[in-house]
Image: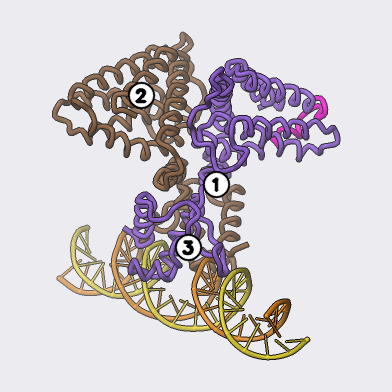
Chain colours: A purple, B brown, C orange, D yellow
DNA sequence: AGGCGACCTGTGGTCAGACCACACCGCCGG
DNA sequence: CCGGCGGTGTGGTCTGACCACAGGTCGCCT
């Protein structure tokens, strides 16, 4: 086993054992190298991998923010992996679209059910992790999504900006499902999706007309979720995604 | 931008531009460093990331297999990322199980449809990528899955080996769907799944009885897929997964 | 006494050079 | 003709050094 792999395994074990909590810092590279009896380059290679996976963030300088900090970015690693494989041509666009439909219809269904549960008479939401942000509850994410759609109503919005908000909206929709892994996968797909959505948009007969339809469809999806009707939301989101790709001539 | 990131960006661009096809080798680390005007450690860090993502494979020595070879392992990167995040405790087991059900029921449905299409009167399978192996067609994967179940029928099989074959069977099932990305995600989940399946198995009242049930359920799923009945397969696989986790007291 | 600047210290980022282990490949002797 | 053996190119690892950066601290000046 190569040295940097041993370092990686050791760090992973320590991570699983709870040696460092989220937001805490790993020892300095030199200390870690000394502790494990390896050289600094080996430690660096391991940290580089952790960084690419979205496990840690590194920063130079001094103070509480310097060094390798444990963070929580599952989407970073997944996204990079998907992007690289699409770049190398081993992942087909068709598969990515299909996966998107799969994840988003499920998420829409789950989100609807979650909303319905949250607004039940007893008012008790489930006990899923709500994240650390202040607005990460069901109502908060719904509000964020609505705000997003409001911004997308601006007719003067450039197509690029529209697509970016569009992608963010879809990620938010998946976040409403409450499944962090599915959200991470969707966020990871986002990069790959954006690239060919941009390509496909160029082939549209009329961007304005398509944008108007997309706006209406987004509203319909969000309304269905907000009403707790997951099934209707799932149907709407499937039609939304597949409609767009059919229009761009996939 | 850090040096190794520039190297990474450059390699990714070259990859997208088709500078290296699948199976070809990147230049030697020293050459690459010279070409990009950076030091060898920087190149190594970039290659280390590519390796972690499943884009390249490195080997020492000389000859055609030495050096950094472009490979196609979408699952490697995704799997490592999922495993590390589960290790760091930021991904909940519940989310992983939920995602598994989501992916596998979809895959079962898709596989059933694909089998039905393949065995239609005109006998024409779709034109999806069949991979490079000789036995990666629908019939081939079905055969592999059957062989796997046959091996799992051996009552003398240790529980560990049984679970490993079990995981392989589930991945094969997803491969039958024909979607490389979903298969990669499922393969990536495999590592995370195996770890707590092993943990859960220890809590079973009777491994033998559970194993017998699992065998029967596997057969039922595969039979439904082979019969082209995706819906029945999906229902069976959902019951299979959720039943096991209910039994282990998730 | 208080403010503020210069220095100190610890951090990652990068580099150069060296040596090792490995595996093929071709030479050379039997 | 065949087999062993060294050459050669590859990644793997280490050492030591220097740089840039940013926070913390100390001491000077006001």
Kindly state the secondary structure of the residue where label 2 is placed: helix
Mark 1 vs mark 3, CA separation in Å? 21 Å
| Chain on which label 2 sits | B
Identify the image quadrant of residue D5: bottom left
Residue for badge 3: B44
Q: Residue A15 location, x and y as percent? A: 39, 52
The residue located at (36%, 26%) in the rendering is B141
Range of residues picked out in magenta: A195-209
Would residue B163 be counted in the magenta stretch?
no
At 20% across and 26% down in the image, what residue appears?
A: B205
Q: Secondary structure at mark 3?
A: helix
| Mark earlier in primary sequence (2, 3) | 3
Q: Which mark is residue A76?
A: 1
Badge number at residue B241: 2
The chain ID associated with circle 3 is B
Tell me the crowding category of disc 2: few under 14, some 14 to 19, or many 20 or more residues within 10 angstroms, Cα based: some
- Residue B61 appears in the picture as rendered: no
**Quadrant containing the N terminus of chain B in the rendered view:** bottom right
Horizontally, is A133 left or right of B244 in the view?
right
Position above or below: C7 against B42: below
Whether residue A19 is visible to the viewer of this picture, yes or no, is yes
Alpha carbons under labels 1 and 2: distance apart:
28 Å
Q: Nearer the viewer, mark 2 or mark 3?
A: 2
């Amino acid at each position: 086993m190569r040295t940097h792999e041993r370092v990686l395994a050791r760090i992973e074990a320590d991570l699983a054992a709870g040696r460092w909590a989220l937001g805490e810092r790993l020892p300095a590279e030199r200390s870690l190298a000394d502790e494990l009896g390896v050289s600094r380059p080996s430690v660096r290679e391991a940290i580089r991998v952790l960084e690419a996976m979205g496990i840690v963030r590194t920063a130079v300088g001094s103070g509480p923010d310097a060094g390798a900090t444990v963070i929580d970015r599952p989407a970073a690693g997944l996204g990079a992996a998907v992007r690289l494989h699409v770049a190398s041509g081993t992942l087909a666009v068709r598969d990515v679209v299909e996966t998107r439909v799969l994840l988003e219809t499920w998420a829409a269904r789950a989100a609807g059910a979650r909303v319905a549960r949250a607004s039940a008479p007893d008012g008790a939401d489930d006990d899923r992790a709500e994240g650390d942000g202040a607005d990460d509850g069901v109502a908060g994410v719904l509000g964020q999504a609505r705000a997003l759609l409001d911004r997308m109503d601006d007719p003067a919005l450039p197509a690029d900006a529209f697509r970016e908000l569009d992608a963010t909206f879809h990620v938010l929709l998946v976040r409403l499902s409450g499944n962090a892994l599915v959200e991470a996968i969707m966020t990871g797909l986002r990069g790959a999706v954006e690239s060919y959505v941009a390509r496909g948009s160029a082939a549209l007969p009329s961007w304005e007309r398509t944008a108007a339809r997309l706006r209406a469809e987004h509203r319909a999806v969000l309304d269905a979720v907000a009403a707790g009707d997951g099934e209707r939301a799932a149907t709407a989101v499937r039609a939304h995604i597949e409609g767009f790709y059919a229009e761009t001539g996939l």
